[in-house]
Amino acid sequence: MIQDIKYAASLSGVKEVSILGLADLNYWNDMLNPYAIKPLSVDNKAQIQIISAEAKFKGINFSEVSFSVVIEPPPISHKLEDAACLIQAYNSNKLFAFSE
């Protein structure tokens, strides 16, 4: 059973761009193996996702970028079609970066 996710903040008017790319599957298999996570294989490559956003929260402008690897959904999540493992994220606001 998948429960509704409760978010700490909801934003509107976000400018966002997403890029999907392919990377070395063996590298990401090795990197994620200690965590019992498998990258999703697409044409024998790992799929990576880069997302950049610009937004405003409570009058504070900020930008962020995140880097993720698309993974095989965990066995316990039968209904999930898409899953990703966040590798690294950056935020232009130090307080927001610390909070996240």
Image (tube, rainbow, N blue to C red):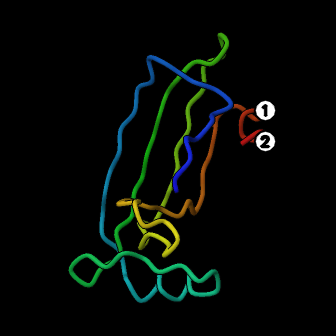
Instruction: State the image coordinates of residue 27 (x, y, percent, origin top left).
Output: 46, 85
In the picture, the disc for residue 26 is none
Residue 11 drawn above or below residue 87: above
Judging by the rendered image, the residue that carries numbered circle 2 is 98
Q: Give the quadrant of residue 87.
A: bottom right
**Circles 2, 1 touching at the beta carbon (< 8 Å):** yes
Helix, strand or loop under label 2:
helix
Q: Nearer the viewer, residue 76 or 74?
A: 76
Quadrant location of the C terminus in the rendered image: top right
Relative to 98, is 8 on the left or the right?
left
* Residue farthest along the front direction in this orientation: 1
Judging by the rendered image, the residue that carries numbered circle 1 is 95
Instruction: State the image coordinates of residue 24 (x, y, percent, origin top left).
Output: 37, 81
Q: How many marks?
A: 2
Instruction: State the image coordinates of residue 5 (x, y, percent, origin top left).
Output: 58, 41
Residue at 30 percent across and 63 percent down: it is 21
Q: Which of 94 and 7 is in front in this view?
A: 7
Residue 21 drawn above or below residue 44: above
Label 2 – label 1 distance at C-alpha: 5 Å
Crowd class of label 1 (few under 14; some 14 to 19; many from 20; radius 10 Å): few
Q: Which amino acid does label 1 sit on?
A: Leu
Residue 27 drawn above or below residue 87: below
* Residue farthest along the left direction in this orientation: 43
